[in-house]
Amino acid sequence: MAKLKDLALRPERLSAGHRLCPGCGVPGIARLAVRSTEDYLVVGSATGCLEVSTTIYPYSAWKCSFIHNAFENVAATVSGVEAAYLALKRRGKVKENFKFICFGGDGGTYDIGLQSLSGAMERGHNMVYICYDNEAYQNTGNQRSSSTPRGSNTTTTPVGKLSSGKTGRRKDLTAIMAAHHIPYVAQATADNWKDLSRKFEKALEVEGPAFINVLAPCVPGWKYEEKETINMSRLAAKTCFWPSFEVDNGVWKLNFKPKEKLPIEDFLKPQGRFRHLFRPENQHVIAELQQEVDENWEEILKRCGEK
Amino acid sequence: MPQILALTGNEAVAYAMKQINPDVVAAYPITPQTSMMQKFADFVAGGEVDSEMVLVESEHSAMSATLGAQAAGARSMTATSACGLALMFEILYIASSYRLPIVMPVVNRALSGPINIQGDHSDTMGVRDAGWIHIFSENAQEAYENTLQAIRIAEHPEVLTPVMVTLDGFIISHGVETVTIFDDDKAKKFVGEYKPRYTLLDTKKPLTLGALNFSDFYFEHKATQLEAFNKSAGVILDVGREFKKTFNSTECYEFFEAYKMDDAEFAVVVLGSTAGSVRMVVDDLRSRGVAAGMIKLRVFRPFPHEELAKALKGLKACAVMDRSIAYGGDGGPVHIEVRSALYGIHPAPMMCNYIYGLGGKPIEPEHILSVFDDLKEAVVKKSFKRRVGYLNLKE
C-alpha cells in the first residue's frame, strides 16, 4: 500500500478550481481514488454533483481523460471505453496500461443507473465503480433517492402535518453488488483515509470489476456545519450506520468495529435533515432507524465471521 | 472474386460488418434485428473477425457502450430496431453532439403500442432530429453496400457525424436474396483505417468529453454540429461515386433514385423496400402509355430539398408514401419534407400523401396502382378525394 507521502507526491489528477461546495465530502474521495494508481486513467462520471462541478465548459478540473455521457449510464459508457482499450491493445494501437474508474452519486447508482451498473459488473469489465453516496439527489436540491435514510427531510419528502420525512428503509446496494460475485466489493467512510486508500488500491489492482460505496456527507443536503464533514463520516461509522467492510473474492471482512457502538441519535443530531425527529411525535422514527441499524450491523457481523 | 451468396438482409449487413471488422461491437437482441448480431457473433466465435463484443443488458447500454468505445478511439458499431432505438433516444443525441462517427444498422420496425414486431418506419422517423444521417435501403444488396459507405461518410473529417443505415423489418431483414459480397481486401481498403483526432486513450493529450455547456456555449456548439451535418451532403455523393467506381456497382448512390422521371407526369415518392413494387407498377403503367415515374429516396437526413424540388418540378401530380405517422402534422414525415421542398417552385405538382404499411400491413402492386389512378383523377378534377389518405386499410 502506498504511504501518504507517496500519494502526496503523485501528480494531481483532479485539480483545484472545481466548483463543488465548501465542505463537500466528494472531492476528497475522488482525489484519493484517482491517486490510487500510477497507471494511465480514464475517469467516467454519471451526471451529478461531481460532473457538473468539475467540467464546466471551457474548463475541466481533470488532468486525466474524463468522459461524461448521461445520468444512468456511466457503467455502460466506461464498459465501452474498456472494451475499446482491449481491442486497441490487441491490435497494437495502444501500448500503455490504463485503468478505468466510474463515479456516480446515489441517484445515478442506486436508482437510475442500477441496471447499467449491474450489467457492467456481470459482464466482468476491468473497472472500478465508486459510488459517492450523499443519500439524496443533492445536485438537484435534496430530493429523496433509494439511499435516503428513513426520516430524512428532503424536498420530495418534506416534513409536514402528515409527514415525518422519508418513509421506508434504504436500499442495501453494497450487498446487492456483493451478490454479483465480482472480485471486490467494499463500503467505506471518508474519515479513515488509510482504509479508503487501501480499498481504492485493492479495487484498482484486482482483475475484473470492483465496486466501492463511500458515504459522502453533503453540507447543503444534510444541513450541518462545513467543517464537520469528516466528523459526519466518523459518526456514521461509530454508530454503525455506515459499516466499513469489504468482500474480497466472496470473503466478507469487517474493517472497523467501534469500541463502543454509539446510539444513532449521535449521527442524527448534528444534521438539519433529521431535526424534526427529535420532536416527541417523531421519536418512533428514531427507534425504527436504530432497529434498522442494529439489524444491519448484526447481519454484517455474521457475514464477516465476527459472530 | 466477389461472392454471390443467398443471404437475408440481416446476414448481408453482418457481412459488411465482418469486412469492416470494427474494434468494438455492442449488441442486444430485438426482433427483427436479432439475427444480424447473431450472424456477427458467429464471425467472432469463428475467429473471422477480432472485434471486442460487449453483450449489454439493454439498447440504452448498447448505445452508451458504443459511445464510450468510439470516444476511446475505437471504430464501434451496434444495431437495433423499434423500441430498442426508442430506448437509445437520449444517447443518440449525445453521440452526435460528441461528433462520434458511429455507424448503426437499424432494422425498421413499428413502435409499440400496440406492440407489433413487423416493419414500418416509425422508429427511425421518431429519431429524425437526433443529428444522425439516415440512409434507407431498398434491398439486401443496398443494405450491405450502404453499410460499407456509411463508415466513410461518418468518419469523414469534415462530417464526424453518426449514420444509421436502415432496412425494412422482415421484408429485407429476413427475406433471402442473392447478394454480391465484394472481395474482402477491396472492401477493407475502401473502408480504410479509423484515425480519430482525439481519444480518451491518448496519453499525451488527455481529453475531457461531455462537459457542461451553459447558454454561453451550448447554442454555438449545436450550430457547429449543424454546419458539419450539412457538409455531409457532398460527402455522401463523393463516397457514393467512389463506391460505384471501385466496385462497379449498378445501384444508385445519390440522394435518391429518379426512375423514369425525365418525362413523367405522375410520380410516387417512396422509401425502402416498397420502391421495388413501385418500380414494377411504373413499368406496367409505362407499357400502357401512362407517363409514370418514381423517386426512391435514399437519404432522408440530410434531406435533399433542392435536388428533389428540381426532380419533381413540372410533374402534373405526385404522391408521397409514408410508412409512419406524424400525429397532427401535414401527413407523414416524408410528405412534410417534400411539400416543404416544393415551396416557391413553379410549376409545382399537385401533391397528396398516403400512410401505408404500418405494423407490417402488406403493400401490393394494386395499392400502388390505385395511387397512380388517384393522381390521374385528381388532375382531371383539379382536386384530391383526400389530400392525406390511407392505403390498404380495412374499413
Image: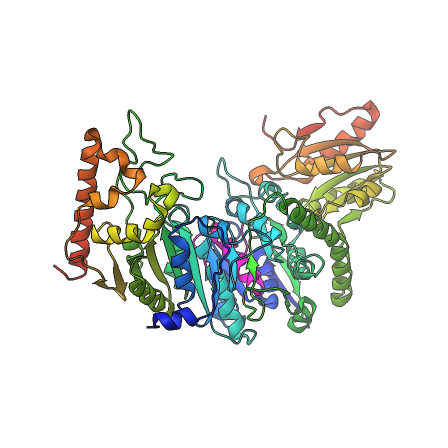
Total count of labels: 0
Residue B61 falls within the magenta-colored stretch: yes
Above/below status of B280 relative to A254: above
In the rendered structure, the answer to whether residue A10 lies left or right of residue A284 reads right
Residue segment shown in magenta: B55-81
A282 to B5, vertically: above or below: above
Q: Quadrant of the N terminus of chain B?
A: bottom right
User: Which residue is the extreme one toward the left?
Assistant: A307
Residue A276 visible? The answer is yes
Tell me, what colour scheme is on the image? rainbow
Residue B232 percent coordinates (x, y): 72, 54
| Along the line of sight, the residue nearer the viewer: B57 or A65 | A65
Residue B392 or residue A214, whichever sits in front: A214
Splitting the image into 4 quarters, where does residue A168 fall? Answer: top left
- The one nearer the camera, A292 or B245, is A292
Left or right of residue B219, residue A95 in this image = left
Location of residue A270 (image quadrant) = top left
Q: In the rendering, at what x and y percent does residue B379 appear?
A: 82, 28
